[in-house]
Amino acid sequence: MGAWLAGAGSIGALVAFIGGGLAMLAIGLCYSEMAAAYPVSGGEIAYVFEAWGPRWSFAAAWFLAFSYIFTTSFEAISVEWIVSAMIPGFGGPVIYELFGQEVRLWSLALGLGLMAVIAIVNYRGGETAAWFQELMTAGLIVTTAAFVIAAFFGGDVANLAPRFVGDTPRAALIGIVVVLAGTPFWFAGFDTIPQAMEEVEEGAKLRLLPRVIGASIAFALIFYCLVIVATSISIPRPELLAAELPAAAAIEGAFDSPLLGKLVLVAGLCGLITTWNAIFFASTRIVFALGRARMIPPRFAAVHDRFGSPAVAVVFVAILGSIGALFGRNAILMIVSGSAITAALVFLLVVVGVDRLRTRRPELKRPYEVPGGRRFLHVSVVLAAGLLISSAYETFVGAGRTIPAEWIVIATWGALGVVFYRIAAPLRAQVDETELRRLILDD
C-alpha cells in the first residue's frame, strides 16, 4: 500500500488498479474460452500446446510455475511480517542478514511452519484445500468489511491529497504506469481456477466459467479500490507513508484504536493465507501436468494412493517455496516484480493462442466463446502485451536502467527449466504425438 500511494498518489493508484483490472478481465474471458474447451489440470500447458506446440507449452508452464511457487515465498515472508507487527518483539534473535535485512529466528520459523501446514492441507487433496480456502475467505471478507466501514466513518476526504504524484500530467502518468506494472501479480489468482478443472464434479457446467472467473476479477478489483480509498482517507499522507504497515496505521490513527489496527492485520493475515493456499494448489497442478506430459521427469506426476493429490509435486513446491522464504523481507518487491513479468508473459501467450486457435481449429468444440469475436481478442492481445511491457520496463527503470535482478533471476529459472526439459528428453522420445496429446489434454 505504501509503494502504491507513494508511486502514484491516492487517485493515481485507483486509476492504475481499475486499468489493470479491466485488462485482466479481458484476459480472464480468454482464459474462460480455453478452460471450457480444455478442462484439464495445468491449463496453460494444454492451451499453449494446442496453439504453439510442446516447446512453447513447456516455456509457458515453467514460467508460470516460477510466478506461482515464489508467490508462496512472498506469502511466507509477509505472514511473519504481519505477525511481528501484531506481537511486538515476536521476531526473536537475528540468525543472518540478507539484502540489508535482518532475518530473525521465530519469524522465519513461523513462515516455514505455515508453509508446512499449507503443504499438508494440499497433500490431503483438493477437497481439504477447498474447505480451508472457504474458511479463510470468510475471515477475509468479514474483517475487511469492518476495516472499510470504520475508515469511511472516521476518515477525511481531504487526506486523499495528493491525488496524483508530480506536478505535470506526464509525471502523474508515469506514477500510474509504475503501479499498473505490478497489477498482473495482484490480480493473478483467477488463473488458478482452470488448474482445478480436472478435479471438479462430473457434469459441471463449463459455460459458467466466464461468470466465475469474471466475478473473481471483479471482486478483486472492488476489494483493492475500497482498501486504497479507505487507507488514503484515514490519516494524512505523510503519517501514512511513514508507517511500516500503512493500512493498519491508517485505521489505528483515525480512531486512536490499536484494536482496530490489529483488526486490519487480521484481515491481511486471512488474505495472505487464502492466496497462499490457492497459489500453492495451482503450483502443484502445474508441476504435476509438466511431469505427466514428460516435459520434466514423470516422477512429478505421481499421485497419492489415498488422497489423490500430486504428492511429489506438493513436496517439490513446498521445498522451493521455503527456499525463497529464506531471503527475507527485502526480497518481497523482487518477487512481486519478477512474478508480474512471468505472469504477464503467460497471459500474452494464452490470449494470442485463443486467436490463433480460431484459425487453426475452427471445428473445436467451445462451450464458451469470448464476446465480440476476433476484434475483442485483438484488443485483449494489446492489453496483455501492454502489461508485459510495463512490467518489464518498470523493473529496468527501477534498477537505474541497468539489468535488473529480476531479469537475472528469471533467466536463471529459465536455464534450470532447460536442464529439466533435457533430462526428460529420452522419455519424451518414447512417446508418439498421439500419446503426448493424451498426456497433455487428457484426450
Image: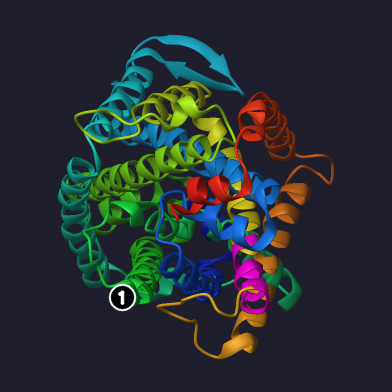
Q: Position of residue 253 (x, y in %)?
A: 29, 53
Residue lying at 32% horizontally and 70% vertically, measured from the top left = 212
- Please tell me in which quadrant of the rendered image residue 284 appears: top left
Looking at this view, is 442 or 170 the one in front? 442
The answer to whether residue 375 is above or below residue 275 is: below
Q: Which residue is mark 1?
A: 208
Count neighbours of disc 1 (C-alpha within 10 A) and say few if under 14, some if 14 to 19, many if 20 or more: some
Residue lying at 53% horizontally and 39% vertically, measured from the top left = 290
Looking at this view, is 296 or 439 the one in front? 439
**Residue 304 appears in the figure:** yes
Residue lying at 49% horizontally and 45% vertically, measured from the top left = 439
Q: Position of residue 382 (x, y in %)?
A: 69, 75
Check disc 1 and report its element: helix, strand or loop: helix
**Residue 383 appears in the figure:** no
Residue 352 included in the magenta stretch of the image? yes
Residue 226 included in the magenta stretch of the image? no
Applied colour scheme: rainbow
Q: Quadrant of the C terminus?
A: bottom left
In the picture as drawn, the residue positioned furthest to the bottom comes out as 372
Q: Is residue 433 left or right of residue 261?
A: right
Q: Position of residue 235 (x, y in %)?
A: 37, 60
Looking at this view, is 7 or 368 the one in front? 368
- Please tell me in which quadrant of the rendered image residue 216 appears: bottom left
Residue lying at 71% horizontally and 31% vertically, measured from the top left = 418
| Most common secondary structure along the magenta stretch | helix
Stretch in magenta: 349-360
The answer to whether residue 359 is above or below residue 393 is: below
Q: What amino acid type is highlighted by mark number 1?
A: Leu
Q: Is residue 413 left or right of residue 297?
A: right
Q: Position of residue 64 (x, y in %)?
A: 56, 46
